[in-house]
């Protein structure tokens, strides 16, 4: 039996941006957070596999996270409801730019993106019982040529922290974007059209 969406879904993500985007389209949800405190075992290993494409990587991550979220829901004996998760990565010339480990790496990433077009992939996965589907949104973003001072100022703001590709298009980095082809919400972290399509597909199975 496919679970109903009437009571809402679980969002297996810490991202405040994904919360805002889900709320924007009127989806009721409850947070289902993964472990993050020091000393705790992580729920999901986000390492890339050798030869893995950016698109394959984000889809694998989204599906792994939604499975982990489903297991966490069961372990906590929470009321059963569909679980949604997502993952975003930036790619330049096929190389994956994930979340920078430190601000020096963030500056290096931004320097590489300067004056270039790059891809942003966001995968969304939805699970309800044995049913699991995922979809990947691809967008192309072109940056202006950034000066060393602009990069340093942006990195110093801290907005680069914990963001794929070391930037957030919805924040100060919006001024760097010359052109966007694809899904703005996908670049932010949750492609709304694709997310709504997954939810509608689940509803149709009731």
Image (cartoon, helix red, strand yellow):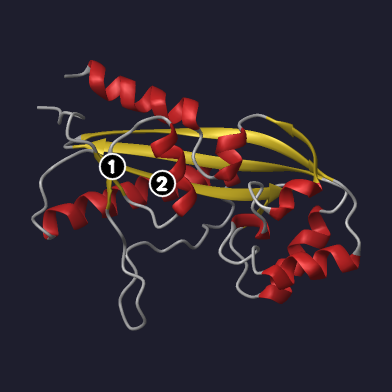
Between residue 106 and residue 95, name the one nearer to us.
106
> Looking at the image, can residue 91 be seen?
yes
Image quadrant holding the N terminus, namely top left
Label at residue 29: 1
- Give x and y (percent) for residue 83: 26, 42
Label at residue 96: none
Say whether marks 2 and 1 touch (CB < 8 Å).
yes
Classify 86 as above or below 198: below
* Residue identified by numbered label 2: 19
Residue 160 located left or right of residue 57 = right
> Furthest-top residue in view?
204
Classify 87 as above or below 27: below
Looking at the image, how many numbered discs can be counted on the residues? 2
Classify 159 as above or below 136: below
- The CA distance from mark 2 to mark 1 is 8 Å
Residue 120 located left or right of residue 193 = right
Name which residue lies at 17% across and 53% down: 73
- Give x and y (percent) for residue 39: 33, 83
Q: Around disc 1, counting alpha carbons within 10 Å, would you say few (fewer than 14), some (14 to 19), or many (20 or more)?
A: many
Q: Is mark 1 on a helix, strand or loop?
A: strand
Q: Around disc 2, counting alpha carbons within 10 Å, would you say few (fewer than 14), some (14 to 19), or many (20 or more)?
A: some
Q: What element carries label 2?
A: helix
Name which residue lies at 17% across and 35% down: 7
């Amino acid at each position: 039996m496919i679970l109903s969406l009437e009571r809402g879904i679980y969002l297996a993500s810490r991202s405040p941006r994904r919360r805002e985007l889900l709320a924007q389209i009127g989806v009721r949800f409850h947070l289902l957070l993964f472990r993050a405190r020091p000393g705790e075992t992580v729920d999901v290993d986000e390492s890339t596999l050798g030869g893995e494409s950016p698109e394959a990587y984000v889809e694998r991550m989204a599906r792994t996270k939604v499975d982990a979220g489903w297991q966490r829901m069961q372990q906590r004996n929470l009321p059963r409801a569909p679980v949604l998760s997502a993952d975003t990565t930036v790619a330049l010339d096929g190389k994956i730019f994930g979340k920078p480990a430190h601000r020096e790496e963030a500056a290096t990433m931004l320097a590489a993106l300067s004056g270039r077009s790059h891809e942003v992939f966001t995968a969304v996965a939805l699970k309800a019982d044995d049913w699991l589907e995922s979809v990947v949104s691809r967008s192309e973003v072109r940056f202006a040529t950034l000066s060393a001072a602009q990069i340093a100022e942006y990195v110093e703001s801290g907005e680069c922290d914990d963001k794929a590709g070391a930037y957030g298009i919805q924040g100060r980095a919006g001024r760097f974007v010359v052109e966007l082809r694809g899904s703005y919400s996908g670049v932010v972290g949750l492609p709304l059209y694709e997310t709504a399509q997954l939810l509608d597909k689940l509803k149709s199975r009731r």
